[in-house]
Amino acid sequence: ADLTTQFLELPLKNPLMNASGVWCSVASQLEALAESAAGAMVSKSCTLQPRDGNPEPRYRVINGERTFGSINSMGLPNEGFAYYLRYAQRHDYEQKPLFMSISGLTLDDNLTMVDSLKDAVIPALLEVNLSCPNVPGKSQIGYDFDAMDTLLAEVSSGYQRPFGVKLPPYFDMAHFDEAAEILNRYPLVAFVTCINSIGNALVIDIDSETTLIKPKDGFGGLGGDYVLPTALANVNAFYRRCPEKTIIGCGGVKSGTEAFLHLLAGATLVQIGTSLYEEGPGIFPRVLDELAAIMDDKGYKTIADFRGKLKTIA
Ligand SMILES: CC(C)(C)CCc1c(C(=O)O)[nH]c(=O)[nH]c1=O
């Protein structure tokens, strides 16, 4: 099978990449991704200033007879915008595309980072994390449609180049409609990454009768097997509603099977989070081999043969 694909006219060796936040916070990790079999890569959502993030334990896998997923409340630990900009300035874009994720603590911080990235004139692709915090007491930007509209208007006029957004999961058809209506009013929003972790889950250890993670009384974002059906729904919902935009799928990918499903649902690229955290960059060749085998079994020669061709029941 031929796993090559394109993203915004850029040729890629394959559709796999990391999810922001996983294996991408420091240069050694970014260099490992650059050397890996991934077709593209993204850096950890950054803030203007470096941040330590929350106290540990802040990321844990959820295990039963196998790993079902993960919960995290990292708190945006990152080296600060300038660090990732420096990495982006020395990245080899011939090797693979690099996405840069930003998650400013304020609208101003986001616009400052957007301005600097625009002035840097580098091929890095901007992914604005809409799970970025809003003013205290208000929901994350992705769930505050007025704030989302304002942020997209400001980033569009500041950046004046194509960029993308990382969306939290939505669970209501009216929310799919409203979010898509806003996104479709911004032609510079060239891609949409669905989904970020399912927010504010709570995982409890029965033996200790204690939460798994320390921050936020144990409340954190859910990843892994638990989120696959929600991830596929969000990929397909925005694929249907935003025909002019490219969808990146994220959530529950641990093998060629889930990568195939994300592509079938309409994703052009597929991000791996929890399973990459657990397995490391060696996951990429494994998932690629599994995806190629599925395509061969089904008689698909290229990704275009099946991408977005999910069938519904007549
Ligand atoms: C949740 C925020 C800290 C506001 C943003 C960063 C982030 C984090 C994080 O750094 O805790 N974890 C996620 O699963 N997704 C995210 O987007």
Image (spheres, rainbow, N blue to C red):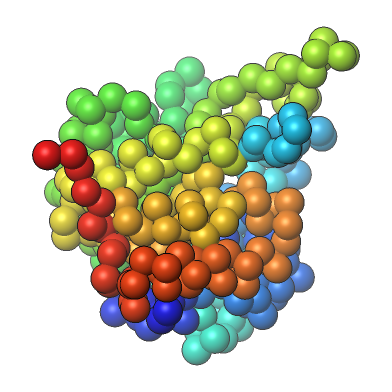
Measuring from the top left, give residue 266's x and y in whole percent.
29, 55
The count of marks equals 0
As drawn, the residue found furthest toward the bottom would be 94
As drawn, the residue found furthest toward the right would be 208
Q: Say if residue 188 shows up in the picture.
A: yes
> Is 99 on the left-hand or right-hand side of 283?
left
Measuring from the top left, give residue 41's x and y in whole percent.
54, 68
Quarter that holds the C terminus:
top left
At x 27%, y 72%, the residue is 304
At x 47%, y 81%, the residue is 13
At x 50%, y 32%, the residue is 198
> Is 244 on the left-hand or right-hand side of 256?
left
> Is 97 on the left-hand or right-hand side of 57?
left
At x 75%, y 44%, the residue is 52
Foreground: 170 or 106? 170
As drawn, the residue found furthest toward the left would be 314
| Above or below, 314 relative to 287 | above
> Is 100 on the left-hand or right-hand side of 82?
left
Foreground: 132 or 282? 282
Q: Say if residue 123 shows up in the picture.
A: no
Measuring from the top left, give residue 238's x and y in whole percent.
25, 46
Measuring from the top left, give residue 232's x and y in whole percent.
38, 43
Quarter that holds the N terminus:
bottom left
Foreground: 197 or 147? 197
